Amino acid sequence: MTGSEPVIKLVDVHKVYKLGKTEVHALRGIDLEVGKGDFVAIVGPSGSGKSTLLNMIGAMDRPTKGKVFIEGEDITTLSDKERARLRLHKIGFVFQQYYLIPWLPAIKSVEVPLMLAGVPPSERRKKAEALLREVGLGERMYHRPSELSGGEQQRVAIARALANDPDILLADEPTGNLDTKTGAEIVSLIRRLNEERGVTCVAVTHDLEVAAAAKRVLYIRDGRIVPRAPPLMLGKEKALRPEE
Amino acid sequence: MKIADVFRMAKDHMLASKFRTFLTVLGIIMGVMAMTSIMSVSEGFGVAIREAMETYFNVRIIFVTSIGATGTMKCPLYVNDVNNIAGNMTGDVEEVFPGLFGVTTVVGYEESVLLVGSVHSKGKKVWPSLYVPLEGEIPEDYEHDVVTVGYEVAKELAKALYGSDDPRVLVGKTLRLNITIAVPGEILSKPEILLTFYPWTVRVKAVIQKTGVNLAGFDMDAAIITSFEDMKKHLRPPSYDELSEKVMWAYVGSPYNARLSGSQFKLWLKTQGLDKEYQQKWEDYVPVVYDKLCSIIVVYAKSVNIVDALCERLEEYFKATGNRDPRIIALKAYARAIDSVFAIFRSLLIVLGVIAVIVASLGVFNTMTTSVRERVREIGIMKAIGATSGTILKLFWTEAILMGLIGSALGVLVGWGVAYLIAATGLLKGVVAFGAVFQVSAEPIMTEAIALSSFLTALVATAVCGYIPARWAAKYDPIVALRYE
């Protein structure tokens, strides 16, 4: 990969879901390039295709048409196993509902991706502890999700996403279930990780705070990236540094 | 993901959902316990039955009998055969002795009773648990005019002769035996003549304990047993000259149909012009042939394993000596027959055991399926963070196998304990009973084979039943799984 090559590149990506006899066009020709160390917020209303787009980038779903490149590699042609490996090593996911395994304490949750990658127990324990400290959970490592607040759970999820030092962090409404203050903390954490670790971040969000923290904001509507903020975003455009 | 980590994750989940794990493992334990205890109990039954048969039937015994399947004399057996067998087959034969069967009535008790002439000392050796006195002592071989009386016939005689319900009263008493024989066809072919001798007075030396056993056609409980020599003497057809002295009654069959005294019979032979013929043929037959005959030869093999081969050798011997084909009855064949019946019984028990394990495995199937349904989102999470379908399969399957391992191992141990508990409570005692004599107390027997086969059957069954839900889990699409409510 050359220095100028984007970490994420989507070329004319379409996604059509079939719901019975009805076809739902979730994505209608997305072209996107995200460079290394970038922090892109994808903003759009519900049903605009944000999450679908994130799933395409995260190798969770395959486009009906078009190509998705991660670090120059076309991932649309990869087998399920290869895609799983890609998610394990190159991509970290953060979800709105945190998606922590309920019976695992924080430390073990963070250890799971390391375990999947075959990292030896002592090494992964050290790394998980370091990551939890990094996200500010040094004191609550052995708590289960049910014993943690929403913000703490999301920090665990972020630590887990970073476990295998991925190049890309994908966040799907990372503050969606959090109060404003906690949401802001999470946003600043992601921003800090982006700046300090150089992790390429892509976040889909409703939250203007998230968008404000991003280096770039993309608007998506009806499965297309639109050149400017949709009506509900007007007035915030300047603050959001929209990309024309 | 390393296999150790797969086990670690599976173990962590099992510990996290302790109650569910406990119930599932308990289900497997119950199934394996049932299987193990059923198998060890049936093994115990098998061994108990075999031991009982060795003890009571003595499967090393081979009966050679001159009586064919239809009850008629098939071919002659001679006392000399006993000596030949003893001499020719020393390596295989531990004991060999003759026996003679006859019929008698007892004065005061007019029913026919089986009279057996044998060798007391050898009977004691060959049937150590059958030829045992209830009262009195088994006579020595040199004693004459003494008998042992079978339990049932002793009971009848005690009642008829002494008005007692206790057969033991007979011991020390005398019995007067009215022996009846048929005049051999070799002496007089027609008409049929039955001779009843003057009573033979014998002393009862012992009443045999109840055996409930029928040995090669004779019921020991319904027999009076005396020495072979005495039998030979008292069953011997009288010569023409001895007729008046020995014969009390002669029954001359069709067309004469008469009952004559000894001297009347002698006279009748004379008037019929048969006296010379009788005397001549008697001389040709009785001292030459009849005195050497026996009804049965008991061969006691040196070990159970050579019984079959010995039977073949005996067949060859009789074929080679006069082309004879006597019935050769090996009790080992009885043992085999009962063994095979028991094998069917045991198969039935094994089927029951396997059903128990299948039920337990379905418990695993049920638990694992429910677990998969409950953990769909977890499967989605695992896939989102990079787990392959193979890893998911391994995680779920390993959990099922771990439960199978624990349940099977504990089940074998508990099953063992339960089997002994059954034995300790005496539930099995008397279940294996063939007549009164077979009071077998079957101890469950735990062999390595039983433990291993129960363990492996259960493990394989749980592995199979755990694999299917694990496959379902592995096949979930990550996005669908994450959205699963």
Image (spheres, coloured by chain):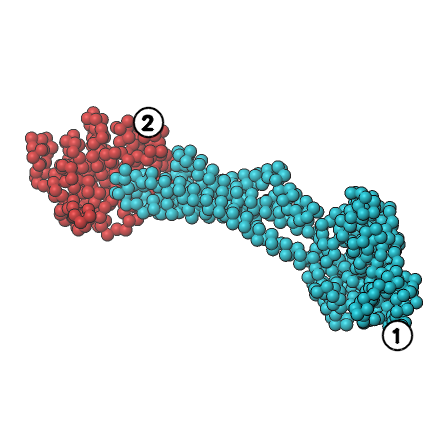
Subunit of mark 1? B
- Around disc 1, counting alpha carbons within 10 Å, would you say few (fewer than 14), some (14 to 19), or many (20 or more)? few
- Image quarter of residue A207: top left
Query: Is residue A122 toward the left or the right of residue A28 in the image?
Result: right
Residue B153 appears at what percent x and percent y?
78, 50
Residue B40 appears at what percent x and percent y?
58, 45
Residue A167: numbered disc = none
> Is B117 in front, or is B484?
B117
- Around disc 2, counting alpha carbons within 10 Å, would you say few (fewer than 14), some (14 to 19), or many (20 or more)? few
> Is B214 in front, or is A48?
B214
Q: Secondary structure at mark 2?
A: helix
> Does residue A41 sit above or below B234 in this rendering?
above
Letter of the red chain: A
Subunit of mark 2? A
> Is A112 in front, or is B241?
B241
- Image quarter of residue B18: top left
Q: Amino acid at mark 2?
A: Glu
Residue A58 appears at what percent x and percent y?
23, 43
Residue B97 visible in the snapshot: no
Residue highlighted by disc 1: B273
The colour assigned to chain B within the rendered structure? cyan
- Image quarter of residue B219: bottom right
- Which residue shows up at 52% across the image and 42% down it? B34
- Which residue shows up at 83% across the image and 60% down it? B180
Residue highlighted by disc 2: A147
Query: Is residue B370 toward the left or the right of residue A41 in the image?
Result: right
Residue B462 appears at what percent x and percent y?
44, 45
- Which residue shows up at 82% across the image and 62% down it? B181
Q: Secondary structure at mark 1?
A: loop
Task: Find the distance from the CA under tag 1 to the CA under tag 2.
Answer: 124 Å
